[in-house]
Image (cartoon, rainbow, N blue to C red):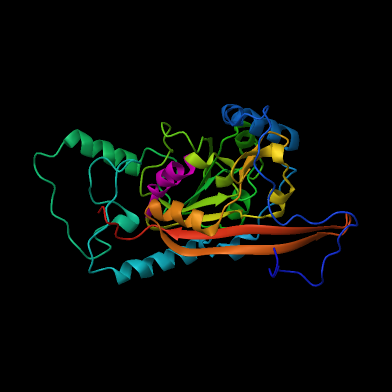
Amino acid sequence: MPGTVWSGQKSRPRRRRGKSRRTVPSGCARRNKVRPVDYEINANKYWNDFYKIHENGFFKDRHWLFTEFPELAPSQNQNHLKALLSENKGSEVPVCRSSEDGSGLIIEAQHSCSSVSLGRKTQPPPVEENVTQKLRHLEICADEFPGSSATYRILEVGCGVGNTVFPILQTNNDPRLFVYCCDFSSTAVELVQTNSAYDPSRCFAFVHDLCDEDKSYPVPGDSLDVIILIFVLSAIIPDKMQNAINRLSRLLKPGGMMLLRDYGRYDMAQLRFKKGQCLSENFYVRGDGTRVYFFTQDELDALFTTAGLEKVQNLVDRRLQVNRGKQLTMYRVWIQCKYRKPLLSSTS
Protein backbone atom coordinates (compact mmCIF):
# COMPACT_ATOMS: atom_id res chain seq x y z
CA MET A 1 0.00 0.00 0.00
CA PRO A 2 1.65 3.25 -1.09
CA GLY A 3 2.79 5.52 1.73
CA THR A 4 2.29 2.91 4.45
CA VAL A 5 4.87 2.78 7.23
CA TRP A 6 5.53 -0.78 8.39
CA SER A 7 6.81 -1.60 11.86
CA GLY A 8 10.33 -3.01 11.63
CA GLN A 9 11.01 -1.71 8.11
CA LYS A 10 14.62 -0.57 7.71
CA SER A 11 15.12 -0.53 3.98
CA ARG A 12 13.12 -0.80 0.82
CA PRO A 13 12.46 -4.51 0.14
CA ARG A 14 13.88 -6.14 -2.97
CA ARG A 15 11.56 -7.16 -5.74
CA ARG A 16 12.12 -10.25 -7.78
CA ARG A 17 12.69 -9.65 -11.45
CA GLY A 18 9.70 -10.20 -13.68
CA LYS A 19 7.22 -10.07 -10.80
CA SER A 20 5.55 -7.17 -9.08
CA ARG A 21 4.18 -7.30 -5.56
CA ARG A 22 0.39 -7.30 -5.56
CA THR A 23 -1.09 -4.46 -3.51
CA VAL A 24 -4.80 -5.27 -3.88
CA PRO A 25 -6.65 -8.58 -3.52
CA SER A 26 -7.44 -10.60 -6.59
CA GLY A 27 -11.00 -10.49 -7.86
CA CYS A 28 -13.63 -12.73 -6.35
CA ALA A 29 -14.82 -14.49 -9.50
CA ARG A 30 -15.31 -18.09 -8.41
CA ARG A 31 -14.68 -21.25 -10.31
CA ASN A 32 -17.74 -23.45 -10.76
CA LYS A 33 -16.25 -26.21 -8.64
CA VAL A 34 -15.96 -23.96 -5.59
CA ARG A 35 -19.18 -24.22 -3.57
CA PRO A 36 -19.09 -22.18 -0.34
CA VAL A 37 -21.79 -24.34 1.25
CA ASP A 38 -19.53 -27.39 1.01
CA TYR A 39 -16.89 -25.72 3.17
CA GLU A 40 -19.54 -24.69 5.72
CA ILE A 41 -20.95 -28.21 6.00
CA ASN A 42 -17.54 -29.86 6.21
CA ALA A 43 -15.81 -27.21 8.34
CA ASN A 44 -15.44 -29.59 11.27
CA LYS A 45 -13.71 -32.19 9.10
CA TYR A 46 -11.25 -29.66 7.67
CA TRP A 47 -10.20 -28.36 11.09
CA ASN A 48 -9.91 -31.86 12.57
CA ASP A 49 -7.72 -32.87 9.64
CA PHE A 50 -5.60 -29.74 10.18
CA TYR A 51 -4.86 -30.62 13.82
CA LYS A 52 -4.33 -34.31 13.06
CA ILE A 53 -1.60 -33.32 10.62
CA HIS A 54 0.08 -30.52 12.61
CA GLU A 55 -0.85 -31.51 16.20
CA ASN A 56 0.90 -29.05 18.53
CA GLY A 57 3.84 -28.22 16.26
CA PHE A 58 2.25 -25.57 14.04
CA PHE A 59 1.75 -22.58 16.38
CA LYS A 60 4.13 -21.11 18.93
CA ASP A 61 3.06 -20.19 22.45
CA ARG A 62 1.79 -16.61 22.48
CA HIS A 63 3.85 -15.04 25.25
CA TRP A 64 3.32 -11.63 23.60
CA LEU A 65 -0.23 -11.73 24.97
CA PHE A 66 0.74 -10.10 28.25
CA THR A 67 2.33 -7.16 26.47
CA GLU A 68 -0.62 -6.55 24.17
CA PHE A 69 -3.32 -7.61 26.64
CA PRO A 70 -2.29 -6.80 30.24
CA GLU A 71 -5.92 -7.50 31.17
CA LEU A 72 -4.94 -11.18 31.25
CA ALA A 73 -3.13 -10.53 34.53
CA PRO A 74 -5.96 -11.00 37.06
CA SER A 75 -4.63 -8.71 39.80
CA GLN A 76 -4.29 -5.78 37.38
CA ASN A 77 -7.72 -6.17 35.88
CA GLN A 78 -9.45 -6.71 39.23
CA ASN A 79 -7.95 -3.48 40.55
CA HIS A 80 -9.17 -1.70 37.43
CA LEU A 81 -12.67 -3.11 37.85
CA LYS A 82 -12.78 -2.06 41.50
CA ALA A 83 -11.88 1.48 40.45
CA LEU A 84 -14.68 1.47 37.88
CA LEU A 85 -17.16 0.19 40.44
CA SER A 86 -16.17 2.85 42.97
CA GLU A 87 -16.86 5.53 40.37
CA ASN A 88 -20.39 4.23 39.96
CA LYS A 89 -21.44 3.87 43.60
CA GLY A 90 -24.24 6.35 43.20
CA SER A 91 -25.63 4.72 40.09
CA GLU A 92 -28.16 2.01 39.50
CA VAL A 93 -27.02 -1.47 40.49
CA PRO A 94 -26.09 -3.75 37.54
CA VAL A 95 -27.97 -7.00 37.37
CA CYS A 96 -26.99 -10.59 36.82
CA ARG A 97 -29.08 -12.84 34.62
CA SER A 98 -29.54 -16.55 35.00
CA SER A 99 -28.87 -17.55 31.40
CA GLU A 100 -27.13 -16.48 28.21
CA ASP A 101 -30.20 -14.94 26.66
CA GLY A 102 -30.82 -12.73 29.68
CA SER A 103 -34.03 -14.45 30.68
CA GLY A 104 -34.82 -15.51 34.20
CA LEU A 105 -34.96 -13.98 37.63
CA ILE A 106 -32.97 -10.83 38.45
CA ILE A 107 -31.54 -11.10 41.97
CA GLU A 108 -28.52 -10.08 44.00
CA ALA A 109 -25.38 -11.89 42.84
CA GLN A 110 -21.75 -12.27 43.86
CA HIS A 111 -18.60 -10.38 42.86
CA SER A 112 -19.02 -7.40 40.52
CA CYS A 113 -22.82 -7.74 40.48
CA SER A 114 -23.21 -7.58 44.24
CA SER A 115 -25.45 -4.78 45.47
CA VAL A 116 -23.65 -4.84 48.82
CA SER A 117 -20.30 -4.02 47.19
CA LEU A 118 -21.86 -0.92 45.67
CA GLY A 119 -23.25 0.34 48.93
CA ARG A 120 -26.86 0.05 47.78
CA LYS A 121 -29.75 -1.99 49.11
CA THR A 122 -32.26 -3.68 46.88
CA GLN A 123 -35.93 -4.22 47.57
CA PRO A 124 -36.87 -7.78 48.61
CA PRO A 125 -38.52 -9.83 45.86
CA PRO A 126 -42.32 -9.94 45.85
CA VAL A 127 -43.99 -12.78 47.78
CA GLU A 128 -45.57 -14.19 44.65
CA GLU A 129 -42.13 -14.74 43.03
CA ASN A 130 -41.64 -18.17 41.51
CA VAL A 131 -39.61 -20.00 44.19
CA THR A 132 -38.59 -22.82 41.87
CA GLN A 133 -37.19 -20.34 39.38
CA LYS A 134 -35.20 -18.57 42.10
CA LEU A 135 -33.69 -21.81 43.37
CA ARG A 136 -32.72 -22.83 39.82
CA HIS A 137 -30.94 -19.49 39.33
CA LEU A 138 -29.01 -19.86 42.59
CA GLU A 139 -27.85 -23.34 41.57
CA ILE A 140 -26.59 -22.15 38.19
CA CYS A 141 -24.77 -19.10 39.57
CA ALA A 142 -23.21 -20.81 42.60
CA ASP A 143 -22.62 -24.50 42.06
CA GLU A 144 -23.49 -25.90 38.67
CA PHE A 145 -20.59 -24.97 36.42
CA PRO A 146 -16.81 -25.59 36.36
CA GLY A 147 -14.81 -22.86 38.08
CA SER A 148 -17.84 -21.56 40.00
CA SER A 149 -15.67 -20.82 43.06
CA ALA A 150 -13.18 -18.73 41.08
CA THR A 151 -13.19 -14.95 41.35
CA TYR A 152 -11.54 -14.29 37.98
CA ARG A 153 -12.61 -16.19 34.88
CA ILE A 154 -11.15 -16.13 31.38
CA LEU A 155 -12.61 -17.82 28.29
CA GLU A 156 -10.65 -18.36 25.10
CA VAL A 157 -12.77 -19.18 22.05
CA GLY A 158 -10.90 -21.06 19.33
CA CYS A 159 -8.14 -22.28 21.63
CA GLY A 160 -6.49 -24.62 19.15
CA VAL A 161 -3.90 -26.73 20.97
CA GLY A 162 -3.53 -24.30 23.89
CA ASN A 163 -0.89 -21.83 22.73
CA THR A 164 -2.74 -19.06 24.55
CA VAL A 165 -4.22 -21.01 27.46
CA PHE A 166 -1.03 -22.60 28.75
CA PRO A 167 1.04 -19.37 28.86
CA ILE A 168 -1.81 -17.80 30.86
CA LEU A 169 -1.88 -20.67 33.35
CA GLN A 170 1.91 -20.75 33.64
CA THR A 171 2.19 -16.98 34.16
CA ASN A 172 -0.69 -16.60 36.62
CA ASN A 173 -0.42 -18.60 39.83
CA ASP A 174 -3.45 -16.97 41.42
CA PRO A 175 -5.60 -19.82 42.82
CA ARG A 176 -8.70 -17.68 42.22
CA LEU A 177 -8.12 -17.78 38.44
CA PHE A 178 -10.00 -20.23 36.24
CA VAL A 179 -9.55 -20.52 32.46
CA TYR A 180 -12.09 -21.95 30.04
CA CYS A 181 -11.11 -22.81 26.48
CA CYS A 182 -13.06 -24.22 23.59
CA ASP A 183 -12.53 -25.11 19.97
CA PHE A 184 -14.61 -26.27 17.03
CA SER A 185 -12.21 -29.20 16.52
CA SER A 186 -12.53 -32.16 18.88
CA THR A 187 -9.00 -33.15 17.87
CA ALA A 188 -7.63 -29.80 19.09
CA VAL A 189 -9.49 -30.04 22.41
CA GLU A 190 -8.17 -33.57 22.94
CA LEU A 191 -4.62 -32.29 22.41
CA VAL A 192 -5.24 -29.62 25.07
CA GLN A 193 -6.65 -32.12 27.56
CA THR A 194 -3.75 -34.55 27.10
CA ASN A 195 -1.09 -31.84 27.45
CA SER A 196 1.03 -32.30 30.58
CA ALA A 197 0.33 -28.66 31.55
CA TYR A 198 -3.46 -29.18 31.57
CA ASP A 199 -4.84 -28.92 35.11
CA PRO A 200 -8.59 -29.66 35.46
CA SER A 201 -8.67 -27.77 38.75
CA ARG A 202 -7.70 -24.56 36.95
CA CYS A 203 -8.88 -25.11 33.40
CA PHE A 204 -11.83 -26.57 31.52
CA ALA A 205 -11.47 -27.43 27.81
CA PHE A 206 -14.55 -28.31 25.78
CA VAL A 207 -15.72 -28.65 22.20
CA HIS A 208 -17.97 -25.82 21.03
CA ASP A 209 -19.22 -24.44 17.73
CA LEU A 210 -19.10 -20.66 17.87
CA CYS A 211 -21.95 -20.50 15.34
CA ASP A 212 -24.27 -22.98 17.05
CA GLU A 213 -27.00 -20.85 18.64
CA ASP A 214 -28.73 -23.88 20.15
CA LYS A 215 -25.73 -25.01 22.20
CA SER A 216 -25.05 -23.06 25.37
CA TYR A 217 -21.70 -22.35 26.99
CA PRO A 218 -20.95 -24.14 30.31
CA VAL A 219 -21.07 -20.85 32.27
CA PRO A 220 -24.00 -18.57 33.18
CA GLY A 221 -24.46 -15.06 31.84
CA ASP A 222 -22.53 -12.19 33.43
CA SER A 223 -19.88 -14.56 34.81
CA LEU A 224 -16.70 -13.97 32.76
CA ASP A 225 -14.07 -11.28 33.26
CA VAL A 226 -12.30 -11.73 29.91
CA ILE A 227 -13.11 -13.38 26.58
CA ILE A 228 -10.24 -13.91 24.13
CA LEU A 229 -10.64 -14.20 20.34
CA ILE A 230 -7.26 -14.76 18.66
CA PHE A 231 -7.48 -15.38 14.90
CA VAL A 232 -10.78 -17.22 15.32
CA LEU A 233 -13.61 -14.88 14.29
CA SER A 234 -12.12 -14.72 10.80
CA ALA A 235 -12.60 -18.47 10.42
CA ILE A 236 -16.41 -18.39 10.42
CA ILE A 237 -18.85 -17.31 7.73
CA PRO A 238 -19.40 -13.51 7.86
CA ASP A 239 -23.19 -13.82 8.11
CA LYS A 240 -22.85 -15.62 11.46
CA MET A 241 -20.33 -13.31 13.11
CA GLN A 242 -22.80 -10.89 14.70
CA ASN A 243 -24.85 -13.55 16.49
CA ALA A 244 -21.66 -15.18 17.74
CA ILE A 245 -20.43 -11.92 19.28
CA ASN A 246 -23.90 -11.19 20.72
CA ARG A 247 -23.92 -14.52 22.56
CA LEU A 248 -20.41 -14.04 23.90
CA SER A 249 -21.12 -10.52 25.15
CA ARG A 250 -23.90 -11.86 27.38
CA LEU A 251 -21.37 -14.02 29.21
CA LEU A 252 -19.26 -11.02 30.29
CA LYS A 253 -19.62 -9.44 33.70
CA PRO A 254 -20.39 -5.72 33.70
CA GLY A 255 -16.94 -4.20 33.16
CA GLY A 256 -15.66 -7.41 31.54
CA MET A 257 -13.48 -7.21 28.42
CA MET A 258 -13.51 -8.90 25.02
CA LEU A 259 -10.04 -9.04 23.46
CA LEU A 260 -9.48 -9.72 19.77
CA ARG A 261 -6.57 -10.03 17.39
CA ASP A 262 -7.28 -11.04 13.80
CA TYR A 263 -6.42 -10.57 10.14
CA GLY A 264 -6.70 -7.07 8.65
CA ARG A 265 -7.62 -6.09 5.12
CA TYR A 266 -4.74 -6.38 2.61
CA ASP A 267 -2.67 -8.64 4.83
CA MET A 268 -0.03 -10.57 2.92
CA ALA A 269 -2.10 -13.73 3.19
CA GLN A 270 -5.05 -12.06 1.44
CA LEU A 271 -2.90 -10.75 -1.40
CA ARG A 272 -1.55 -14.23 -2.08
CA PHE A 273 -4.94 -15.88 -2.61
CA LYS A 274 -5.90 -16.68 -6.18
CA LYS A 275 -9.28 -16.01 -7.77
CA GLY A 276 -10.46 -19.59 -7.39
CA GLN A 277 -10.00 -19.42 -3.63
CA CYS A 278 -12.41 -16.53 -3.02
CA LEU A 279 -15.75 -17.60 -1.53
CA SER A 280 -17.21 -14.12 -1.09
CA GLU A 281 -15.97 -10.56 -0.65
CA ASN A 282 -12.77 -10.71 1.50
CA PHE A 283 -13.57 -14.33 2.52
CA TYR A 284 -11.29 -17.09 1.21
CA VAL A 285 -10.66 -20.82 1.45
CA ARG A 286 -7.16 -22.18 1.98
CA GLY A 287 -5.76 -25.23 0.27
CA ASP A 288 -6.59 -27.39 3.31
CA GLY A 289 -10.27 -26.37 3.28
CA THR A 290 -10.13 -23.96 6.26
CA ARG A 291 -11.44 -20.44 5.66
CA VAL A 292 -10.37 -16.92 6.55
CA TYR A 293 -11.90 -13.43 6.46
CA PHE A 294 -9.96 -10.15 6.39
CA PHE A 295 -11.45 -7.33 8.50
CA THR A 296 -11.48 -3.56 8.56
CA GLN A 297 -11.56 -1.61 11.81
CA ASP A 298 -15.05 -0.33 11.06
CA GLU A 299 -16.42 -3.83 10.51
CA LEU A 300 -15.16 -5.03 13.87
CA ASP A 301 -16.35 -1.88 15.62
CA ALA A 302 -19.85 -2.45 14.22
CA LEU A 303 -19.86 -6.08 15.42
CA PHE A 304 -18.87 -5.21 18.99
CA THR A 305 -20.94 -2.07 19.46
CA THR A 306 -24.04 -3.77 18.05
CA ALA A 307 -23.51 -6.38 20.78
CA GLY A 308 -23.65 -3.57 23.36
CA LEU A 309 -19.93 -3.25 24.08
CA GLU A 310 -17.90 -0.06 24.43
CA LYS A 311 -14.69 0.55 22.50
CA VAL A 312 -11.48 0.68 24.52
CA GLN A 313 -9.06 -0.02 21.67
CA ASN A 314 -9.32 -0.63 17.93
CA LEU A 315 -6.03 -0.36 16.05
CA VAL A 316 -4.21 -1.68 13.00
CA ASP A 317 -0.88 -3.40 13.59
CA ARG A 318 1.29 -3.39 10.45
CA ARG A 319 4.49 -5.39 10.61
CA LEU A 320 7.29 -6.23 8.25
CA GLN A 321 8.53 -9.79 8.75
CA VAL A 322 11.63 -11.10 7.02
CA ASN A 323 12.43 -14.77 6.57
CA ARG A 324 16.16 -14.55 5.94
CA GLY A 325 16.50 -18.26 5.19
CA LYS A 326 13.98 -18.12 2.34
CA GLN A 327 14.72 -14.46 1.53
CA LEU A 328 11.05 -13.60 1.85
CA THR A 329 9.63 -10.26 2.92
CA MET A 330 6.16 -10.47 4.45
CA TYR A 331 3.89 -7.51 5.05
CA ARG A 332 1.44 -8.41 7.80
CA VAL A 333 -1.71 -6.52 8.73
CA TRP A 334 -3.51 -7.42 11.94
CA ILE A 335 -6.27 -5.67 13.86
CA GLN A 336 -6.30 -5.59 17.63
CA CYS A 337 -9.43 -4.72 19.62
CA LYS A 338 -10.53 -4.32 23.21
CA TYR A 339 -14.21 -3.81 23.96
CA ARG A 340 -15.81 -3.56 27.40
CA LYS A 341 -19.24 -4.44 28.65
CA PRO A 342 -20.76 -1.31 30.27
CA LEU A 343 -21.17 -1.37 34.02
CA LEU A 344 -24.67 0.02 33.58
CA SER A 345 -26.36 -1.25 30.46
CA SER A 346 -29.47 0.34 29.04
CA THR A 347 -31.34 -2.93 29.62
CA SER A 348 -30.68 -2.99 33.37
Question: Is 65 on the left-hand or right-hand side of 242?
Answer: right
Is 71 contained in the magenta span? no
Q: Tell me which secondary structure the magenta stretch mostly adopts.
A: helix
**What residue is shown at x 64% (from left), y 45% (from top)?**
197
Let me know if residue 286 appears in the view.
no
In the picture shown, does residue 126 fall above or below 53?
below
Quadrant of the rendered image containing residue 32:
top right
Give how far across and how far down residue 155 sits, in percent.
50, 48
Asked whether 18 or 153 is in front, the reply is: 18
Give how far across and how far down residue 291 sits, in percent.
63, 39
In what quadrant of the picture does the N terminus appear? bottom right
Question: Is 177 on the left-hand or right-hand side of 221?
Answer: right
Question: Is 86 on the left-hand or right-hand side of 155?
Answer: left
Quadrant of the rendered image containing residue 47:
top right
**What residue is shown at x 75% (from left), y 43% (from top)?**
57
Give how far across and how far down residue 71 sits, in percent.
51, 62
In the picture shown, does residue 75 fall above or below 62?
below
In what quadrant of the picture does the C terminus appear? bottom left
**What residue is shown at x 47% (from left), y 57% (from top)?**
301
Quadrant of the rendered image containing residue 38:
top right
Q: How many marks?
A: 0
Asked whether 197 or 86 is in front, the reply is: 86
Question: Is 226 on the left-hand or right-hand side of 57?
Answer: left
| Residue extent of the magenta highlight | 240-253
Is 252 contained in the magenta span? yes
Q: Residue furthest left?
A: 127
Let me know if residue 291 appears in the view.
yes
Give how far across and how far down residue 117 sits, in percent.
28, 62
